[in-house]
Image (spheres, rainbow, N blue to C red):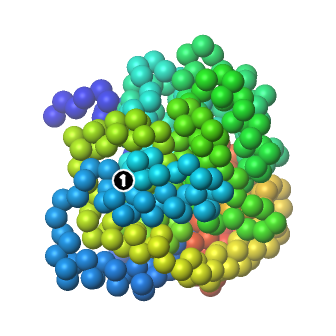
């Protein structure tokens, strides 16, 4: 079978690969503890599930508009205005997509052209560079070290800027590092991007998972002022424990929303009608249901950091958001595991712990640990890792 160049060169998601391998081994009877998946371990809140059941009972099971049902688009706009502290968001500025990933990809298709350079601060989510390449654009990695808190500065971006630079993708809170930019840092980067005419796509999927004293920093106010040069993406997956429902959204200029809707109409068409009703209940309901999940994630972060803090020669900034930890373990590399990929493969094979190597995220010195698991699972898994590293 002869495949296209585009798909022949496309690498699989490292996160999904490690998670899949862990599932296979577990199905074979192995004692596997997985800290690889970026998925809340909590059930979707009951009122959201009830809304989905009601939609089915009322036969709300047909196609909807490509951009999403009007009431959900309005609910997301209202949520955006309230949460981000803006006033300009309207339903026409919101598109509903099949997960946050599709919102991003549709936006990339709407903004990037062949040969355009796209700045991607790293470590970054593994899907950003491949999705940029699928648009025939060029991802330009902008590295940030653990010592810098895994955050880039205007000076870092300026070094990578060229006349071909079309856009930038920034993720806060970050997957894989859990780093959170401050609003002052975001404002400095946004001002630079506006001055340079660099279209900025802000992925704020983990916006509700920020731990005090940190506060969520957003590009939404810059979108409000310059809607033709900024877009903000998010969704229900992480916040409401709704990963499998596949509902994301983007706040953007109405013309870009229309173009994305056309593209979506020619690819996947509308989002599942039942899932949209569930998402509507999420955004319209009491956000108090998020408090216990938030508290559990913060407690688990503290537990993990306490254990990792005992690992000699490992440097790990305390994550301020999301549910990931990204320790720099390169000082522990040995001939038998000279890089993050080899280390993670051995950890899975020898001690039954699934982690994700840092190399696909853009930093081979690190490994990604997800603490979206029970306290006991987290503690047991990290104990196994520690014993392996210092045997």
Relative image position of residue 373 (x, y in whole percent)? 56, 76
Q: Quadrant of residue 69?
A: bottom left
347 in relation to 119, above or below: below
Q: How many marks?
A: 1
Q: Residue at x 16, y 76 (%)?
A: 59
> As rendered, which of 208 and 146 lies closer to the eye?
208
Relative image position of residue 298 (x, y in whole percent)? 70, 74
> As rendered, which of 383 and 193 lies closer to the eye?
193
Relative image position of residue 272 (x, y in whole percent)? 26, 63
Relative image position of residue 49 (x, y in whole percent)? 36, 81
Residue 51 visible in rendering = yes
Q: Which residue is mark 1?
A: 97
387 left or right of 7 in image: right
> As rendered, which of 120 and 201 lies closer to the eye?
201
Query: For the N terminus, which image quadrant?
Result: top left
307 left or right of 97 in image: right
Q: Residue at x 42, y 60 (%)?
A: 74
> Which secondary structure lies at badge 1?
strand
């Amino acid at each position: 079978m002869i495949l296209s160049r585009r798909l022949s060169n496309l690498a699989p998601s490292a996160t999904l690969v490690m998670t899949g391998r862990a599932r296979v081994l577990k199905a074979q009877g192995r004692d596997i503890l997985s800290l690889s998946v970026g998925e809340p371990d909590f059930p979707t809140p009951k009122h959201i599930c009830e809304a989905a059941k009601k939609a089915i009972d009322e036969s709300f099971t047909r196609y909807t508009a490509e951009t999403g049902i009007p009431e959900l688009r309005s609910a997301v706009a209202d949520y955006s205005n309230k949460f981000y502290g803006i006033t300009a968001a309207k339903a026409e500025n919101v598109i509903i997509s099949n997960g946050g990933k599709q919102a991003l990809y549709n936006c990339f298709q709407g903004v990037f052209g062949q040969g355009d350079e796209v700045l991607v601060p790293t470590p970054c989510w593994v899907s950003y560079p491949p999705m940029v390449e699928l648009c025939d654009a060029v991802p330009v990695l902008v590295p940030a070290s653990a010592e810098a808190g895994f955050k880039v500065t205007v000076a870092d971006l300026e070094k990578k800027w060229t006349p071909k630079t079309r856009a930038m993708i920034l993720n806060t809170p970050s997957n894989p590092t859990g780093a959170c930019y401050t609003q002052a840092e975001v404002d400095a980067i946004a001002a630079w991007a506006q001055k340079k005419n660099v279209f900025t796509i802000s992925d704020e999927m983990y916006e509700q998972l920020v731990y005090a004293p940190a506060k969520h920093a957003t590009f939404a106010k810059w979108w409000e002022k310059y809607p033709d040069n900024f877009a903000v993406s998010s969704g229900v997956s992480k916040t409401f424990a709704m990963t499998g429902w596949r509902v994301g959204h983007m706040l953007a200029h109405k013309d870009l929303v229309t173009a994305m809707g056309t593209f979506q109409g020619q690819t996947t068409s509308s989002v599942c009608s039942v899932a949209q009703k569930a998402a509507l209940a999420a955004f319209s309901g009491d956000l108090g249901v998020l408090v216990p999940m938030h508290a559990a994630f913060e407690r688990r972060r503290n537990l993990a950091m306490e254990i990792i803090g005992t690992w000699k020669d490992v440097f790990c900034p305390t994550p301020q958001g999301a549910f990931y930890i990204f320790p720099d373990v390169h000082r522990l590399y040995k001939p038998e595991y000279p890089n993050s990929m080899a280390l993670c493969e051995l950890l899975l094979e020898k001690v039954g712990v699934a982690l994700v190597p840092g190399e696909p995220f853009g930093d081979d010195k690190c490994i990604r640990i997800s603490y979206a698991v029970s306290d006991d699972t987290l503690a047991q898994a990290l104990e196994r890792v520690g014993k392996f590293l210092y045997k």
